[in-house]
Image (spheres, helix red, strand yellow):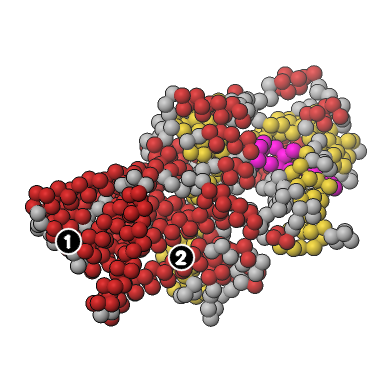
Amino acid sequence: MKFQILHESRGRIRLRAAVYRMSMEQADALEEYAGAIKGVDRATVHESARTLTILYKGERKELISALSRFSFADQEDRLPALSHSSRQISAEYKGKILRHAAGFALRRLLLPLPVRRVYEIYRALPYMAKAVKTLLQKKVTVEVLDGTAIGVSLLTGDYNTAGSVMFLLKLGDYLDEWTHKKSVDDLARSMSLNVDQVWLHREDGVPVLVPLAGIQEGDLIEVNTGHVVPLDGVLEEGDVMIGQASLTGESVPVAKSPGMSVYAGSVVEEGNCILKVTKTAGSSKYDQIVRMIEDSEKLKSEVEARASGLADSLVPWCLGGSALTWLLTRNVTRAVSVLMVDFSCALKLSMPLSVLSAMREASLYKITVKGGKFLEKVSAADTIIFDKTGTLTNACPTVARVVPFSGHDPAEMLRIAACMEEHFPHSMANAVVRSAREHNLDHEEMHSEVEYIVAHGIATRIGGERAVIGSRHFVFEDEGAVILPEDREAFDSLDPRYSHLYLALGGILSAAICIYDPLRPEVSEMIRGLHAAGIGRVVMLTGDSEKTARAIALEAGVDDFRAEVLPEDKAAYIQKEHDEGRGVIMIGDGINDAPALSMADAGVAIGSGAMIAREVADITIAAEDLNRILVMKRLSDALMKRTRRNYRFVMTFNGALIVLGAFGILPPSLSALLHNTSTLILSLSCMTDLLSPG
């Protein structure tokens, strides 16, 4: 697609799409595509203006090239999946609010006073009925105050004030529904598996590319080397190596054979297979997630609950204050002025808007929050616990060194290993080939036909002798390779921090290739930032050996670590932290982290991790940058600061209005106007971003 550049500055570009018009579905598709481009932090599409604004890091040339490859025709299969559109929800509620405001203004301007009075009385009946029903239940809540304020206004002939109160109450309902539905939609779509098409294996054995939504349980799908497993299933045909670091925390791929289960999100690193689907995805998955969210209380934060409770508890005081004012002054106008000011509008509207606006802002940083209360938990926590593999590391094996044996040259051994491994691109083989390339070692074909033994290793012939590379079991037990006596000491002293590939030539051990999973480059900086933001303890939990864990902990800069832990050990450690009175954030990415994610005050899953981890977790962050954890902490702290400021403002300003009304300085209409105007202004301020875009 062609785009016209409208404006450009460092890290920001605004373009207009060369199309006549753009539907909301197309805008969603373009926004999702642009947001997924490598280096893009945020993409925003305005369908009416056909413009795309992108905040990015990295090469401009790559960004423009990626955008030029976009077309709506290629996205047709995605449009049904985007039918649950937050853009559509926003358009719906913007229309409702505009019609509501326009109707209010037109009634004031066009309706004759007698007709308007009748209309306001008619509109007041539901509020009055709700107040009476609440009193009959022996409760004195905000509904009673709303009904009393509207009723007293009508009885005193102040129809304008009654109309304004009802207008603002209805506006508050619309805003609350809008932000709630949009938050639920954003969350549900982010949790849906982002796979578009799969290869369906037909009865005639010919695979056909079909939309994911068309797959049913029992269908056979084909998954080839390098592809993500899109659905849970059971292997029907093929021996494969599955990379499931995001599921189990294992950085080394595991062998799978027919009859074994595989899970969505894992990667076929070696071989091809046919999978029988046991669980499908699609719109039903979306609906299931929506029901899960709406049936829970997760979207209700403690701040909102406290605000609602405080508003209800203040109702008797407001009613009592109005009655006391009338008893002391015998002035109905002063009593009504006090009654016109309640704390419910500001407290019950501004607090949910603050929380849901923070959740919306979090999504701009590719952080999905299931409920406002988890942002509160993040702000209150003093301990963060990290899983290692796939969280602090990328689960991307790298060659650390080559240890030669039998007098061989290490560079030559790496060259031979790369020559053998280049045909089988699993993660460890990729590490060997990549290391050879980085050392400028050409590895032209020097061997005969390669024999590949799934889950064990590779065998061939080089210079007339048998060459094998693979696991310890394969090389020494299956192939019977031996270690020369003079190499025994060096072999026994191989660094246990690393995983090892063994290379044997002519039945004699010739080299050990040490492979490790390096830390993400931003880890140390991120941990320093967490300490500066008020986190007292940063802990790493890993299944690695004590020696490996200690070295990684020192490099990362964590305060404490635990090695050789099982999934249940992680949960037990969090329980111990709770028993000592600490608030805990757990960050992980795999099935093995699920118990700990569930146990923590706030469980945070890495976006590229296992589906079960994302479903169990309370917050999900994008995988490409752990600094988003620091953004999450700063955002939660800013939210709590805003809510405390809101409390102070509501109590101080409305308290002042009550005092001024009681002393007769403010008439009822002005008191209501100031109260309602302050509520609107406060609510609008709550919808602004908490963090600066930079």
Image location of residue 558, percent across then percent down: 48, 31
Comes first in the chain, label 1 or label 2: 2
Image location of residue 557, percent across then percent down: 47, 32
Q: Seen in the image, is 693 located left or right of residue 493?
A: left
Contact? badges 1 and 2 (CB < 8 Å): no
Query: Which residue is at a point 34% across and 63% down the rendered structure image?
Result: 125
Circle 2 Cα neighbour tier, 10 Å, few/some/many (<14 / 14–19 / ≥20): some
Could you say whether the residue bearing mark 2 is in a helix, strand or loop? helix
Q: Is residue 397 magenta?
A: no
Could you tell me how many numbered marks the image carries? 2
Q: Seen in the image, is 74 located left or right of residue 368?
A: right
Query: Which residue is at a point 65% across and 72% down the rendered structure image?
Result: 73
Quarter location, residue 562: top right
Image location of residue 158, percent across then percent down: 20, 67
Q: Mark number for residue 668?
A: 1
Name the residue carrying label 2: 90
Q: Is residue 240 magenta?
A: yes
Circle 1 Cα neighbour tier, 10 Å, few/some/many (<14 / 14–19 / ≥20): many
Query: Which residue is at a point 37% across and 47% down the rendered structure image?
Result: 137
**Magenta part of the protein: which range?**
237-254
Image location of residue 192, percent across then percent down: 61, 54
Q: Calculate the distance from the C-alpha at mark 1 to the C-alpha at mark 2.
A: 35 Å
Determine whether 448 is above or below 51 in the image: above
Could you say whether the residue bearing mark 1 is in a helix, strand or loop? helix
Query: Which residue is at a point 67% across and 47% down the rendered structure image?
Result: 265
Q: Seen in the image, is 230 located left or right of residue 391?
A: right
The quarter of the rendered structure image containing the C terminus is bottom left
Kindly tell me whether residue 203 is visible in this rendering. yes
* Closer-to-camera residue (632/202): 202
Kindly tell me whether residue 638 is visible in this rendering. no
